[in-house]
Amino acid sequence: MNENTAILKTGWNFDNSYARLPDVFFTRLAPTPVRSPKLIIFNERLAASLGLNVQALRSDEGAAAFAGNRIPEGAEPLAQAYAGHQFGHFTMLGDGRAILLGEQITPEGERFDIQLKGSGRTPYSRGGDGRAALGPMLREYIISEAMHALGIPTTRSLAVVTTGQGIQRETELPGAVLTRVASSHIRVGTFQYAARWGTVQDLRTLADYTLQRHFPEAGADDNRYLSLFREVVRRQASLIAKWQLVGFIHGVMNTDNMALSGETIDYGPCAFMDAFDPATVFSSIDVQGRYAYGNQPYIAAWNLARLAEALLPLLHDDEEQAVKLAEEALADFTKQFQSQWLAGMRAKLGLAGAQAEDEILIKDLLDMMQKHRADYTNTFRALTFAKPEETAMSGASEFTEWQKRWRERLSGQRESEDVSQQLMRSSNPAVIPRNHRVEEALEAAVDRGDYSVMERLLKVLADPYAHSPEQAEYCKLPEPSNRPYRTFCGT
């Protein structure tokens, strides 16, 4: 089969620029084949946007490609090397259970990484088996696609295949491979790795490559590496603000889990907040609350400081001057985050323009929500449709007084009530991937082989701002429980 025939048949159209970087950044190797791959979920809309042949990839050939049993024509499989601060401690890392097949060029000329997650051991596995369990791969599929529908930059999920093999964790679990699509997998930890174990030229090569791939307009600046850092700061400020506005908790914001593209990456112990509380933590391993909801902006700034340290040799020949430039650029993160978060919160309350009292109005609402353990998503949904009685704060005098101040603010703006309500409808999702709904879908799929629960959930989450009657059931909170919800790293 020649290359043109392969492209016509499946649509794979690889051009692997990362594989042309110095060898220090990766190890070439193929995925480890699995016993009996079976395609269980396939993102047809995403596949079509990538220029792939949906019908062809629904075949046994597609399942074999998504499992790593068959390498698509033009792919150059490799495992990426990187480092990272995990819960504040620096260590050597790398793709311990993932293989980058290559970069798909879409019909529009866009470039996306195609990565297999759970595809076997690599030189970076550190004693692990390189495999992944079905449940965590389905979780990443659900959450990443929900994030995309919410309008939040994210890696995407193309397919999940079961392997026909069990993997041993605390118990034996069914194995699976996820196909992940990303603008790239260049991480803060990739630069930390280059700074620690590469040469300055390796670091420069990586920075030039990142500029060309993600920030070509910044490459012409006098200090292009400072411009690179500023662009990463800008994208991260925007991303974290969007997380906070929907109540998303990443769960493990290590530096190797921060992508320079500004996409959400590496869904492990992630979840969405129900009752509003800045101290909310779901990850079973985050016992100190380092990555709690309210800490996410501060951790993002901390991670960016680690990127700045790695970039210092490129920012200026004089180290003291390099540090000064980095500090000035990093200081913009807090300003940009606060500006974007505040603009988003105004939109959630239907507020047009900006007035000095807005911050107090927002803070007072959030304080009440925390005090009354009000559901984050449903509170804003109730305000959107003028149903304050549906909030946990209904009947409280302080909430009545707050509503009066809010309505006075709304009545004082030029925009009509209809315009404000439309702004709120488009800023406040009706549905999020509720934790109990996600667990319900995973239990049905993993324990009973029933994927219909997950398919219904995905359908509801695909248009979170529709506020349709079909979504009402998925807005309901779980039954009260004395056991706190816990998530686990996707191993």
Image (cartoon, rainbow, N blue to C red):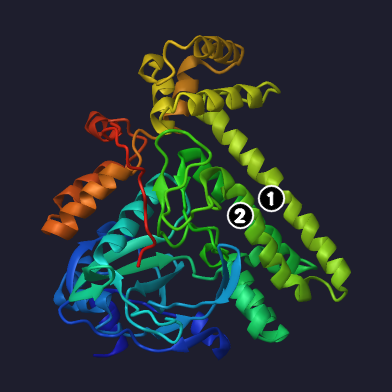
x, y percent for residue 213: 57, 70
Residue 118 percent coordinates (x, y): 32, 74
Position of 360 with respect to 94 (left or right) is right
Between 366 and 423, the one lying in front of the other is: 366
Q: Quadrant of the N terminus?
A: bottom left
| Number of numbered tags placed on the structure image | 2
Badge 1 local density, few (<14 within 10 Å), some, or many (20+)? many
Residue designated by label 1: 333
Q: Which residue is tagged 2?
A: 300
Give the residue type that dot 2 points to: Ala
Above or below, 414 relative to 9: above
Counting from the top left corner in percent of width and height, residue 170 is at 28, 68
Tell which of 421 and 480 is nearer to you. 480
Q: Quadrant of the C terminus?
A: bottom left
470 vs 142: above or below: above
Please report the residue visible at 68 percent of the width from the left and 23 percent of the height from the top. 355
Image vertical order of residue 437 relative to residue 109, above or below: above
Give me the residue at 32% from left, 44% from top: 435
